[in-house]
């Protein structure tokens, strides 16, 4: 079988952990043995970091596969998948590595298991360089469920940089197949809401400052809408360590959800955190896409697996999205096309991502 391994170059395009997540998830689903070389070649610390390794180990365990080269710092792995099984699977980064990224790698796989799954994911819930868990629950979940599956996400504990310690439990049942999605009508913004949070040693005043700075920033562009950004202090028994941040979501008349978020850190003024999130949201609303820039790449693997044609209108295609498309096409029979959206309004910069999905069927059901 070793001769038939699919060779993946982990150093091209975006060149990060995402290549590993997309390719190992698809390897697991399609039963394709894989070799990934030059893992995270362009990063300041190349090779596997704890979060990538815990994601790989979870995939290995949930399909009773074989993993070689699975250690911190390794730049080459080989993976031989087995049969996907449901049940309880645990992944612990033991760092502030993102639980949302662990969820990204496992979710497509357990959708095609033989029985329901429960994922116990431990690490950072609100970490840099990854979606915040609030984004996953408020934006990713309702949109990805349009592929015709549902999942439950229970945030047991929140964890922040540097120590992590957060814990999230995801429950989901398998499906026979995924339906394609059509997200091409942005509609008009009907609501803007969100949460500004502090945890640990930080005073609630910081959350209030983030919230009001964000509201002031959005008000300059959108005057006639009530903006509800709740300042909250995470209960001490539900948060590990100290952290702060904000997420702001815009909901539209057609049910689209677009967001902007930001994290606080030492020496960063809380007004600046609020303004940063507000500016990201406004930028996402300006391009005219029906999904924001963070959601783009997260939808690609589901579009590739779905049965039929999916169409998503987005802003300019991110490198993460181009990378996900490249590896989805390399590993599946899905075909993607990206075309500039013909807009009446010249200030818009929107694109249509179209995919003829491979129509993955769950043979376990």
Image (cartoon, rainbow, N blue to C red):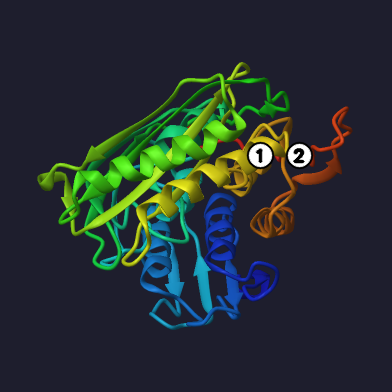
Q: CA distance from mark 2 to mark 1?
A: 6 Å
74 on left or right of 11:
left
How busy is the neighbourhood of tag 1: few (under 14 within 10 Å), some, or many (20 plus)?
A: many
Mark 2 touches mark 1? (CB < 8 Å): yes
Mark 2, Cα crowd under 10 Å, few <14 / some 14-19 / many 20+, is many
Above or below, 271 against 194 in this view is below
Residue 125, percent across and down?
32, 51
Going from the N terminus, do you reach mark 2 or mark 1 first?
Answer: 1
The answer to which image quadrant residue 53 occupies is bottom left
- Residue 126 percent coordinates (x, y): 35, 52
List the residue tagged with mark 1. Answer: 303
What label sits on residue 88 in the rendered view?
none
Q: Is residue 353 above or below residue 90?
A: above
Q: Tell me what residue is drawn at x 53 percent, y 29 percent.
A: 250
Residue 263 locus on image (x, y percent): 39, 54
Where does residue 297 sit, x and y in percent of width and height? 62, 49
Q: Quadrant of residue 266?
A: bottom left
Quadrant placement of the N terminus:
bottom right
Badge 1 marks a residue whose secondary structure is helix
| In the rendered image, the vertical position of residue 161 relative to residue 172, given as above or below | below
* Tag 2 secondary structure: strand
Q: Which residue is mark 2?
A: 355
Q: Looking at the image, which residue is at 61% across and 16% down?
A: 253
As rendered, which of 312 and 363 lies closer to the eye? 312
């Amino acid at each position: 079988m070793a001769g038939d391994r699919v060779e993946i170059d982990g150093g091209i395009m975006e060149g990060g952990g995402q290549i590993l997540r997309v390719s190992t998830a698809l390897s697991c689903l399609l039963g394709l043995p894989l070799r990934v070389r030059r893992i995270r070649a362009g990063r300041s610390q190349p090779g596997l970091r704890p979060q990538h390794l815990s994601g790989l180990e979870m995939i290995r365990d949930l399909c009773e596969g074989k993993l070689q080269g699975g250690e911190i710092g390794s730049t080459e792995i080989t993976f031989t998948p087995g049969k996907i099984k449901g049940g309880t699977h645990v992944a612990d980064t033991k760092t502030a590595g993102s639980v949302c990224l662990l969820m990204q790698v496992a979710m497509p796989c357990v959708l095609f298991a033989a029985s329901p799954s429960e994922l116990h994911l431990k690490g950072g819930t609100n970490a840099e360089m990854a979606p915040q868990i609030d984004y996953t629950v408020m934006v990713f979940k309702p949109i990805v469920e349009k592929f015709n599956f549902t999942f439950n996400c229970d945030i047991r504990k929140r964890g922040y940089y540097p120590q992590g310690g957060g814990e999230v439990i995801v429950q989901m049942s398998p499906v026979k197949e995924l339906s394609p999605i059509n997200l091409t009508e942005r509609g008009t913004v009907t609501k803007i809401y969100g949460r500004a949070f502090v945890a640990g040693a930080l005073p609630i005043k910081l959350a209030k400052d983030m919230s009001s700075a964000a509201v002031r920033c959005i008000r300059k562009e959108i005057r006639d809408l009530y903006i509800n950004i709740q300042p909250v202090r995470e209960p001490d028994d539900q948060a590990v360590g100290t952290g702060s941040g904000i997420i702001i979501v815009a909901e539209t008349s057609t049910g689209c959800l677009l967001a902007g978020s930001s994290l606080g850190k030492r020496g960063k003024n809380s007004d600046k955190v609020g303004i940063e999130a507000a500016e990201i949201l406004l930028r996402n609303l300006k391009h005219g896409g029906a999904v924001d820039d963070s959601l783009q790449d997260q939808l690609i693997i589901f579009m590739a697996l779905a049965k039929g044609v999916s169409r998503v209108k987005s802003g300019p295609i991110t490198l993460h999205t181009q990378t996900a498309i490249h590896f989805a096409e390399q590993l599946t029979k899905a075909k993607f096309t990206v075309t500039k959206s013909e807009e009446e309004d010249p200030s818009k910069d929107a694109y249509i991502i179209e995919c003829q999905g491979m129509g993955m069927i769950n043979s376990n059901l």
